[in-house]
Amino acid sequence: MSQPAWMILIVIAMAALLLPLLADRLRVPAVVLEILFGVLVGPSLLHLLDTSAVLDFLAEFGFLLLMFLSGFEIDFGKLERQGPLQRFTGLGIFLLTLALSYAASRALDRGVFITLLLATTSVGLVVPTLRGTRRTSTALGQIILISALLADLLTLMGVTVFALVQKHGLSWKLLNLPILFLAIAAALLLLRRAAWWNPEWFERLFMSHDPEEVGIRACLALMFGFVGLSYVLDIEPILGAFLAGMVFGLVFRNRGTLEEQLKGFSYGFLIPIFFIDVGIRFDLRALLDPGVLGRAVALIGAAVLVKVVPSLFLLLLRLSPREVLAAGVLLSARLSLVIAVADLGRRLGLLDQGLNAAVILLAVFTATFMPALFRVLAPPLPMQPAPVAPTGAEV
């Protein structure tokens, strides 16, 4: 029996408010508790909530915002500032990860989709962990960051191409992907020209006290424009949303308070609904099957190994073995993107209920324990004292 819309909204609104407070107490990512809350109130346990049109719409909206912010958070300035050695090292780590992921997927009797899924990482976990340990600007932090950025970007591209081939085969519809990229390149060029010729108008996007919130409207307009174009071209809308965020981040490097406002709007309500919906759809009974649980444990082991082993590449940068292990541990933490990829696989029929449950367990496990293990291997650096202003002229 489906629940009324008002009940769904009240339960989810209260969860979105209270779960982050509980997550702070437990020192786990709020996303983990949101997924577990969905499992608790969903059909697997209490059956208080089930899928519905209202929940599906809000979760889809949150999903698209999550992908938009994933693209928006890519700091191209940092990528450009990296030297050739760091960039090639990051690319080498990703390629070796991809090769090991393919070997692991074959060992697990799975295909290309699991290869791409294992190659993902989570910039959304990497960035706050590096900030919390004050290692963002260190050699270790920079190479972890560039490796995570490349993994997120390239795996999402690969998943989109694979999904297109899965749906249409090697047909002329594969040309829709370069058409999308051409449209995005044109939008990027037009936005840059418009920002150059009308800087006063674009400055309003980043005003902290704009009553009309034009900056938020511009982000949503760009996102829905690219998502709509993706639907027209029969391409997965997550790529359109992700690329829209990338374009916005490429054009506007100094975003002022807009990024925080957009994150507050998205992570404050809509994105948590997506993760709660993931938990509601989680099939706990499938995971209780010994065979499925065994595959889940094997998947978690493979997910860690395909990140830790390629991190040995970092010995070329003269990092210590402890730092190299710490890098592999943090890169093995997965959350938003792996759940998004798993959701896509479920909708395309590439993941059965048992494997989908195993992927969610992988995300919950690595997101909970890997950042904590990184802090053990690479403890927070001491805070640098602020420079003291001179009090008078020297004699």
Image (tube, helix red, strand yellow):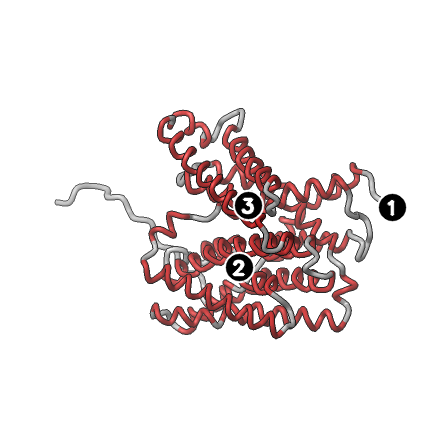
Badge 2: residue crowd in 10 Å (few <14, some 14–19, many ≥20): many
Sooner in the amino-acid sequence: mark 1 or mark 2: 1
Q: Position of residue 321 (x, y in %)?
A: 41, 74
* CA distance separating discs 1 and 2: 38 Å
Q: Is disc 1 placed on a helix, strand or loop?
A: loop
Query: What amino acid type is highlighted by mark number 3?
Result: Asn
* CA distance separating discs 2 and 3: 27 Å
Q: Position of residue 88 (x, y in %)?
A: 37, 62
Q: Position of residue 130 (x, y in %)?
A: 45, 57
Q: Name the residue that disc number 1 marks.
A: 1
In the rendered image, the vertical position of residue 124 relative to residue 116, given as above or below: above
In the rendered image, the vertical position of residue 10 relative to residue 139, given as above or below: above
* Residue 237 position by quadrant: top right
Sooner in the amino-acid sequence: mark 2 or mark 3: 2
Which residue is pictured at 47% across the width and 42% down the height?
182
| In this rendering, position of residue 230 left or right of residue 3 | left
The disc placed on residue 332 is none
Q: Nearer the viewer, residue 139 or 356?
A: 356
| In this rendering, position of residue 88 left or right of residue 16 | left
Q: Name the residue that disc number 3 marks.
A: 176
The answer to whether residue 24 shows anywhere in this view is no
| In this rendering, position of residue 274 left or right of residue 304 | right
Q: Is disc 3 placed on a helix, strand or loop?
A: helix
Badge 1: residue crowd in 10 Å (few <14, some 14–19, many ≥20): few
Q: Name the residue that disc number 2 marks.
A: 121
Image quadrant in which the C terminus is located: top left
